[in-house]
Image (tube, helix red, strand yellow):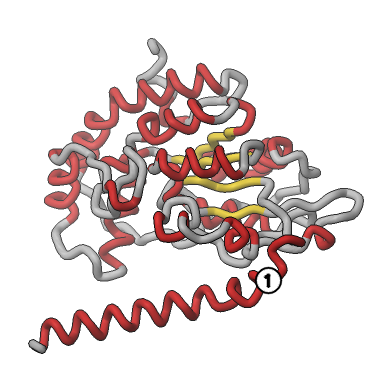
């Protein structure tokens, strides 16, 4: 056994052990799954757009009991697709803990779901009436934040400009082993901002009133009104919200070359028009994200 092979083998064992440790609390609750609730809502996306922050804010609501873990990943994993649905229910509270007046709800947040039609079809089959939340942000800023996230975790070593220009030049491709024709791997920085492509299967499979798309910029600019709209969507009582909306897991950013910003904006111009058309079709009463206003007035 060579040194490099031994290191990979040891790293693989460590990953399996960490995965088992993370899942241990769920495994211990599995026996009680028949008495546990199904989620009322799922935050299905998007990475680096404030999904963690929204789940934390909802978890602080007196009518919300969050899942055991934030990201369950049950519906995107073919490995989990061979595990009974009772394993998924083990992540949620007992139904008796949600009873009362007013009633309480529960939900999870796995931002990778939005890129996978495989996940959309499985959720439609198992949870046909679930409510789906999607948090998006200016795709240019999302791509930059995504790069710095990967850099901070040691999974990216190239310079920012080289990395994002390479990503823009590479057509987004699916990863069939993860399921779903729009699932993108973590290095497709530009592709993950093609929101219309990601959302189209969800609007196809679910009723329009089951999906709620909100922009991070709206949460930051007017957290009270935006969180009230989220609460209305989930049929829970709005709470007074007089503090700033703070993005969790925000990645630090250096000054970015204006030319790179311009290239990213140009790359997303037509995809943003597609997104505006999609949102106006399915959410005509919801305001568009601020970065969609102006350039898409003629859609």
Position in image of residue 298 (x %, y %): 38, 10
Q: Secondary structure at mark 1?
A: helix
Q: Which residue is mark 1?
A: 31
Q: Residue furthest top?
A: 298
Instruction: Determine whether, in the image, residue 292 is placed left or right of residue 36.
Output: left
> From the viewer's perspective, is residue 296 above or below residue 58?
above
Residue 1, horizontal then vertical, whole percent: 10, 89
Looking at the image, which is closer to me, 25 or 135? 25
Q: Is residue 66 above or below residue 23?
A: above
The residue shown at (14%, 60%) is 158
The C terminus lies in quadrant = top left
Q: Is residue 164 above or below residue 279?
A: below
Q: Identify the residue at horizontal 67%, vertical 58% (top origin).
A: 59
> Relative to 37, is 188 on the left or the right?
left
Could you tell whether 217 is left or right of 211 in the image? left
Residue 217 in the image, given as x and y percentages of width and height: 49, 40
Residue 141 in sight: no
Report the residue at 31% width, 40% height from top. Answer: 140
Q: Residues within 10 Å of mark 1 (few under 14, many from 20)?
A: few
Q: Is residue 62 visible?
A: yes
**Camera-side residue of 70 and 60:** 70
Q: Nearer the viewer, residue 107 or 150?
A: 107
Total marks drawn? 1
């Amino acid at each position: 056994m060579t040194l490099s092979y031994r290191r990979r083998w040891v790293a693989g064992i460590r990953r399996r052990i960490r995965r088992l440790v993370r899942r241990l609390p769920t495994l211990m609750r599995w026996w009680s799954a028949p008495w546990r609730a199904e989620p009322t809502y799922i935050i299905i996306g998007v990475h680096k757009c404030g999904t963690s922050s929204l789940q934390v804010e909802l978890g602080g609501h007196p009518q919300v009991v969050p899942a055991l873990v934030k990201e369950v990943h049950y519906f995107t994993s073919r490995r989990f697709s061979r595990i009974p649905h009772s394993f998924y229910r083990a992540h949620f509270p007992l139904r008796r803990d949600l009873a009362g007046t007013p009633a309480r709800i529960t939900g999870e947040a796995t931002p990778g779901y939005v890129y996978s039609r495989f996940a959309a079809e499985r959720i439609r089959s198992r949870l046909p009436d679930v409510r789906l939340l999607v948090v998006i942000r200016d795709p240019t800023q999302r791509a930059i934040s995504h790069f710095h996230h990967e850099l901070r975790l040691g999974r990216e070593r190239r310079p920012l400009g080289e990395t994002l220009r390479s990503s823009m030049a590479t057509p987004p491709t699916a990863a069939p082993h993860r399921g779903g024709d729009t699932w993108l791997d973590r290095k497709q920085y530009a592709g993950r901002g093609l929101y219309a492509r990601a959302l189209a299967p969800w609007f196809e499979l679910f009723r329009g009133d089951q999906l709620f798309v909100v922009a991070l910029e709206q949460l930051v600019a007017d957290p009270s009104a935006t969180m009230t709209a989220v609460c209305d969507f989930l049929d829970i009582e709005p709470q007074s919200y007089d503090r700033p909306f703070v993005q969790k897991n925000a990645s630090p950013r250096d000054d970015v070359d204006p030319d790179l910003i311009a290239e990213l904006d140009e790359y997303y111009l037509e995809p943003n028009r597609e997104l505006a058309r999609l949102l106006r079709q399915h959410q005509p009463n919801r305001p568009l994200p601020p970065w969609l206003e102006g350039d898409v007035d003629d859609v």
